[in-house]
Amino acid sequence: MILYVISVGLSVTMGLMGFINLAHGVFAMAGGYVFATALGRFGVPFPVALVLAFLLVSLGSVVLERVLYSRLYAAGELAQVLFTIGLIFMSVAVARAIYGTIAPPVFLPDYLKGQVPVLGRDFPTYRVFLIAFSAILILSLWFGVERTRWGAMVRAAVDNRAMAQSVGINTRRLFTLTFALGSGLAGLGGGLGADIIAVQPSYAFEHLVFFLIVVAVGGLGSLRGPFIAALLLGIADTACKYWVPQFGAFLIYVATIGILLWRPQGLFGVRA
Amino acid sequence: MTHAGGYSADPRIRWPEYLPWIAALAAFFLLPEYLSLGARILIFILFALSLDLILGYAGIITLGHSAFFGLGAYVAGILSAKLGVTDPFVQLAAAAAAAGVLGVVTGAVILRTRALTLLMLTLAITSIVLEIANKASWLTGGADGLSGVQTAPILGLFKFDLFGKTAFLYCLAVLFLGWWLVRRLIYSPFGAMLTGLRENTTRMHAIGAPVYRRLVGVYTISAVMAGVAGGLLCQTNQFVGLNVLGFEPSGELLVMLILGGVGRIYGAFVGPVVYLIAQDLLAKQFPEYWYFGIGSILVLVVLFAPGGILGLIEKWLPLSRLKSSARASAR
Amino acid sequence: MAAALETQELCKSFGALTVAHNIDFRLQAGDRHALIGPNGAGKTTFVNMLMGAVAPSSGRILLGGEDVTAVRQAARVKRGLGRTFQINTLFAQLPVLDNVALGIAERRAVAPRMWRPASSHREIRDECLELLATLGLADDAAVRSADLPYGKQRLVEIAIALGLRPKVLLLDEPAAGVPSAETDRILQILEKLPSEIAILIIEHDMDLVFRFARRITVLVQGEVLVEGPPDEIARDVRVHQVYLGESHHA
């Protein structure tokens, strides 16, 4: 589920803006650090810490976008890949310098600890919370993209930037906002998941494959896609690790390859 | 003007192309304390050449090239440590063959996709190989790595000595062969075709080129080369660890190649030399700054010097005029 | 004798949008046929289906009497189908010679060879230069195609296709974007094309169409409106109606 929240941000920036941002994990990691620091060091309440993670990462991403990313929109895939890998390297160094290599402890509030009975079985409260939260998130996002003017403008701008500009849509600002949203979501996801997925300097590298898998299998530009993909892959992964522990990690990869061979544009993607 | 090859190009070797070999031999005689670093550089040049073939020429963006490198290393190592096969050429041949099989199988599967999906699949594949190496510790030594690798003297005569002299010359010889083959390939009609693929795939379809088949072909050749490089690494270090697989070596190689200059054959020479020497000098002193440094260099190169070091040289030195006059005289 | 190129009830829909409906079309060897119609009539989609770049929703395509509906683009090219693109699709960074050579090398099965240098294949270079000479481009052989004026680039487009020695040639708006002073040049080149080739030209330039074509098909909203010799088409009331309000552009 955490994968979904983080990856949907990537699906937004990549699918809607066409920019291959491998450094997406960096924003998630940054969110995780902000969240954990706010919670732990500054004793900020849980919801506020989440909001901080979202906001600060969004703001940071705006700076990065204006200064660096925007130069590369037309640059071609290789340049974008290389550039964002460079960003990952830099972020690893910065994170290591500030935080060291040990993941900061996450102090969950009491009301989210422990277990909660759902449908007769006991589940960890936090996990249930995550699932519920993610569901609300996808609904609001879907609503936002499908039903609001903002969503329509983004879709128009991606479809045909020149046309959108001539119709009066400020594509520059739109892209910056969208990028900020996508990165903020990543930050939020990083914070939410800090308890489960340790926030370490090498975060962006370690989970790069997963973000890419969720986005590619889900389909670029779609919101439902990464959701279903993260759900499917998460379930499959847990099930396989349970039944066939030897091959735990593989099956995600094999499943990914299988799905993409069957539908190269992803489950819900639009064929280019 | 960047890429060599094509129907208008002059394939004869020009004098600057002798420089790398002269430099390598000079290093052998003048810098005997650095021969193990030197061998490592030579190995990565071969690895970078293999990547340049698919990245710079065919235009396939991959983060998974370490899969072939690592597989080659492990196959050579397992052959020696577990099966007692110590002949260096047999080890290399096995590494090449294994990498080639992986190349053609994975290539056939993933080269039907493009861009992001392709990139992700290459990463997935190298992650799979890493997982296998990790889990199958009875075969690969797992996280501890594979030790006890022995390589018999080359041709029965040249033992791998402690100073790395044999290793260096051995790697140099293999690199020379690899370079020569790549150069032939670049200047051949196949090489011209690769440039066409990269420049305009749509047009290639429309002139009857079986694009998919050709991509799988070059991908396999590249995999074989990467596998040989991996085998060399295993033989010179007499050890293979998990760090030959996964994202990191692929990412590092990409940095090396971009630094040197993609699609220029010799970018694959310049990049590893600069990178590995800098790493040797700086990384141990300032590990945090090192990562930051390569990250920022990558960003700067992409933004301001997309042709890498060779691209900058081409812009500022008259060598580029030498190249274009060679082109003119070929007609 | 089988038609050089034929379609039977060719249909194509993208979701709810039908861009081709029951198109029956025949092209014989040596034909000079033009396909015209208002913007959005589905002409380029039709060409893409003929080439195999886009799969039809239903219907058959026959090349030289053989069903090629399921055959890939590259294989159709090998069987004698060639095309030019409406927007220049050249190897922009490469010299004109290489642009043409790549196609000739494919045809001669030289392209997969990995040993001898490309430039040592004299027969390919010679054929290129010969072909370029017939188009008046011999002096530009070493020029990077991106550096050529637009009109000459259009000619390189045609050269690449001719290098394939096609039996059927599909020309997608060869005069598109070319200043009207130079369209005569294009027409001259078209008239000099080998007479055995079956040529289908898509064009908006009515001048060019009426001077070049011996038969014209009018396509409107994915359906064939009418087909016949130029003078009949020029007189046809329905054709006039279709073009009413559309300004004649060169």
Image (cartoon, rainbow, N blue to C red):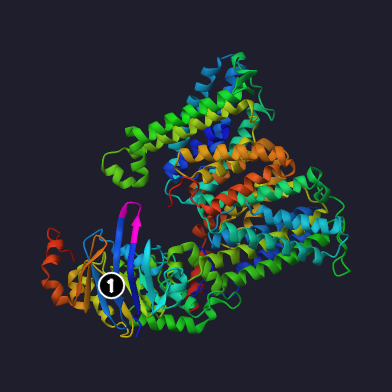
Q: Is residue B322 visible?
A: no
Location of the N terminus of chain C by quadrant is bottom left
Q: Position of residue A76 (x, y in %)?
A: 46, 51
Residue at 79% over, 55% down: B234
Frontmost residue, B165 versus C30: C30
Residue at 53% over, 45% down: A217
B175 up-or-down from A8: above or below: below
A20 up-or-down from B161: above or below: above
Magenta span of residues: C12-17
Frontmost residue, C4 versus B179: C4
Location of the C terminus of chain C by quadrant is bottom left
Q: Position of residue C30 (x, y in %)?
A: 30, 83
Q: Position of residue C29 (x, y in %)?
A: 32, 83
Q: Is residue C209 visible?
A: yes
Q: Is residue C174 magenta?
A: no
SS label for mark 1: strand
B87 up-or-down from A98: above or below: below
Label 1, residues with CA under 10 Å away: few <14, some 14-19, many ≥20: many
Residue pointed to by mark 1: C201
Q: Main secondary structure of the magenta part?
A: strand
Residue at 43% over, 83% down: C127
Host chain of mark 1: C
Frontmost residue, C250 versus A5: A5
The quadrant holding residue B265 is: bottom right
The quadrant holding residue A212 is: top right
Residue at 57% over, 35% down: A3
Residue B56 vs residue B70: left or right? Answer: left
Give, as a three-letter code, the residue at label 1. Answer: Ile
